[in-house]
Image (spheres, rainbow, N blue to C red):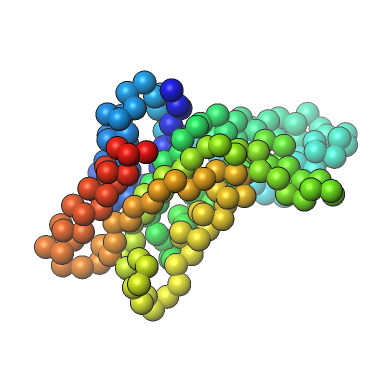
Amino acid sequence: MAHVLHVSASPGGEDSRSLALADAFLDAWRQAHPADTHETADVWNLELPEFDASMIAAKFAVLRAQDATAEQEAQWDRAVRVSQQFNRADVYVFSLPMWNYGLPYRLKHYIDIVTLPGQNWRWSRDEGYQPLLSGKRAFLMYSSAGDFSEGATPQYQDFQKPYMRQWLRFLGIEVAGEAALAPTLTDPDNLTRIREDATARARALAARS
């Protein structure tokens, strides 16, 4: 039995294509793994502490065992609680719309909060950076207006997929599968076909994983 965390990065609700793709994946996953537990982290509705100068000061005061104030300790504890919710999952599903060739800013905020030293990575002078979430898997459900699939020749560079892959690799999480609904900037008939093909890929990926 695994615990599945769906990280929803789209504010689009019923109109969100990445969310619809993730929902199709999760529906098929539930059928294939009925004993698994599920949780959703909607980054648009989570109360995320600001990762500002005050949070950075709290981080180093706590980690360097300096005399952190009660306010700094409380602020750092807020970030740790969000990080621990993320860390306890065994399987991650991300719904990922492309914004300006990268990630929605609210997802980046979430990533900055949950990626904490001592919680899901560590560093030492002898070993350098070491991941702490090895053995976990992630499935990435993308949408984008343009076509950034292998073999396509987009005019601009895709910073969405490489960023997610690198961040998850840093934590030790295996990217076990991806599906993309793209391009969405096309005529209605073609978009219907693209949506159906992407949904079928997502469901098949969940069924065999």
Residue lying at 53% horizontally and 58% vertically, measured from the top left? 163
To which quarter of the image does residue 32 belong?
A: top left
Q: Is residue 110 visible?
A: no
To which quarter of the image does residue 151 belong?
A: bottom left
To which quarter of the image does residue 44 belong?
A: top left
Residue 102: horizontal and vertical position, in percent?
46, 62
Residue lying at 51% horizontally and 54% vertically, measured from the top left? 165
Residue 104: horizontal and vertical position, in percent?
45, 55
Q: Residue furthest left?
A: 189
> Which of the pair 208/18 is nearer the observer?
208
Image quarter where the C terminus lies is: top left
Q: Reply above or below: 24 against 128.
A: above
Residue lying at 75% horizontally and 35% vertically, measured from the top left? 72
Image quarter where the N terminus lies is: top left
Residue 36: horizontal and vertical position, in percent?
39, 24
Label count reads 0
Q: Is residue 30 visible?
A: yes
> Which of the pair 132/41 is nearer the observer?
132
Q: Reply above or below: 123 against 83.
A: below
Q: Reply above or below: 197 against 48.
A: below
Task: Please give left or right for residue 98 compared with residue 50 in the image.
Answer: left
Q: Residue furthest front?
A: 208
> Which of the pair 164/61 is nearer the observer?
164
Residue 176: horizontal and vertical position, in percent?
44, 46
